[in-house]
């Protein structure tokens, strides 16, 4: 009988049992898909993005299928941090896997307040910062498009918590590595690369946008080559761990991200197509390591051969 491969990885001080994490906004508040598999088998769960106060989000229609992808304009609808802690977290504490909160605000102060509130709560293992939000203090400029502003948000959160801090980068910039380096310098423990790409779809019969908000975020297999490229670039630019995401549908996709330097991966749109996608990727990674005689999945990370 061979040795069971080790799948455990470390992301910014958070040790997880395997590199498969569910992406924010695609796994609800962490318990909705429990009828399909035991969520304790996942490396970690990132819950739906949370703000200081409840947000209803954008009007419908706010999801549109596209060739090999999904456009969404949910508008970061959520119940707010207090309702999450009181109503959702008690059930999440029974799941034996780390829970990561994704947070967003429209000012640096809001990010800081969220981090402070989360710091005092048991059952939350790390914080992922969504910097793809408009900064009301700078006329709506997105936090994640400016290195200085991205660093300021990161610095505020890091100073307000002792939990590991992960920054989720936006791909909608000229040079994402500049943002990656800035948030690394500001104290980020890890990076999530990447968020959705801006896109739109039009109904030619009505000559109107298919999304009520006109523009949405594109995810799914259509963005995988671009997400893989950005993950590779980020891994070469910074020393902190990278969590790769964008169009990962199966274990083969996941391995590609590990090879280019991701320490872990997130499964997003695949959850809508197959609610067991994440756990099937965990099993696929284990089977692959056994077949290839890989004793530790960390040996795969960053082992891309370019020559």
Image: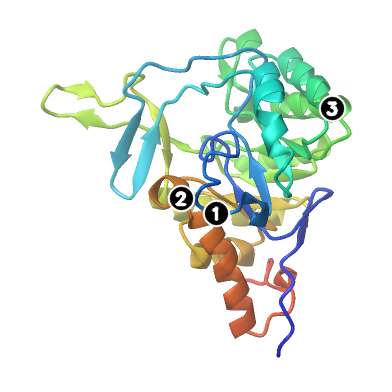
- Nearer to me, 4 or 168: 4
Which one is nearer the viewer's eye here, 21 or 144?
21
Which comes before the other along the chain, label 3 or label 2? Answer: 3
Closer to the observer: label 2 or label 1? 1
Residue 210, position in %: x, y?
26, 26
Q: Quadrant of residue 52?
A: top right
Q: Residues within 10 Å of mark 2 (few under 14, many from 20)?
A: some
**Residue in view at x 48 percent, y 51 percent:** 226
Return the residue at label 3. 119
Q: How many marks on residues? A: 3
Q: Which mark is residue 101?
A: none
* Relative to 249, 174 lies left or right: right
Residue 286, percent across and down? Answer: 62, 72
Which residue is labeled 1 in the image? 37
Relative height, residue 106 to residue 127 (above, below) = above
Q: Which residue is mark 2?
A: 275
| Label 3 secondary element | helix
């Amino acid at each position: 009988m061979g040795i069971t491969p080790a799948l455990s990885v470390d992301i910014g001080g958070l040790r997880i049992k395997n590199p498969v994490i569910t992406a924010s906004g695609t796994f609800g508040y962490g318990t909705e898909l429990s009828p399909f598999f035991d969520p304790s088998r996942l490396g970690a769960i990132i819950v739906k993005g949370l703000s200081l106060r409840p947000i209803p989000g954008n009007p419908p229609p706010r999801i549109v299928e596209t060739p090999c992808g999904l456009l969404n304009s949910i508008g970061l609808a959520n119940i707010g941090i207090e309702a999450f802690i009181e109503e959702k977290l008690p059930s999440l504490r029974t799941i034996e896997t780390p829970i990561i909160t994704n947070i967003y605000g429209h000012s640096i102060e809001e990010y800081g307040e969220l981090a402070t509130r989360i710091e005092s709560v048991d059952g939350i293992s790390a914080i992922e910062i969504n910097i793809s939000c408009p900064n009301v203090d700078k006329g709506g400029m997105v936090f994640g498009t400016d290195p200085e502003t991205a660093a300021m948000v990161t610095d505020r959160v890091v100073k307000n918590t002792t939990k590991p801090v992960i920054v989720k980068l936006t791909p909608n910039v000229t040079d994402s590595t500049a943002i990656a380096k800035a948030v690394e310098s500001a104290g980020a423990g890890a990076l999530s690369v990447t968020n959705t790409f801006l896109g739109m779809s039009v109904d030619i019969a009505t000559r109107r946008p298919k999304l009520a908000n006109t523009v949405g975020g594109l995810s799914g297999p259509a963005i995988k080559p671009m997400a893989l490229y950005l993950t590779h670039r980020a891994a070469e630019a910074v020393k902190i761990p990278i969590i790769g995401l964008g169009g990962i549908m199966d274990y083969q996709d996941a391995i590609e991200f590990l090879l280019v330097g991701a320490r872990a991966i997130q499964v997003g749109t695949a959850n809508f197509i197959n609610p067991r996608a994440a756990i099937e990727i965990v099993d696929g990674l284990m089977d692959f390591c056994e077949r290839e005689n890989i004793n530790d999945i960390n040996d795969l990370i960053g082992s891309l051969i370019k020559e």
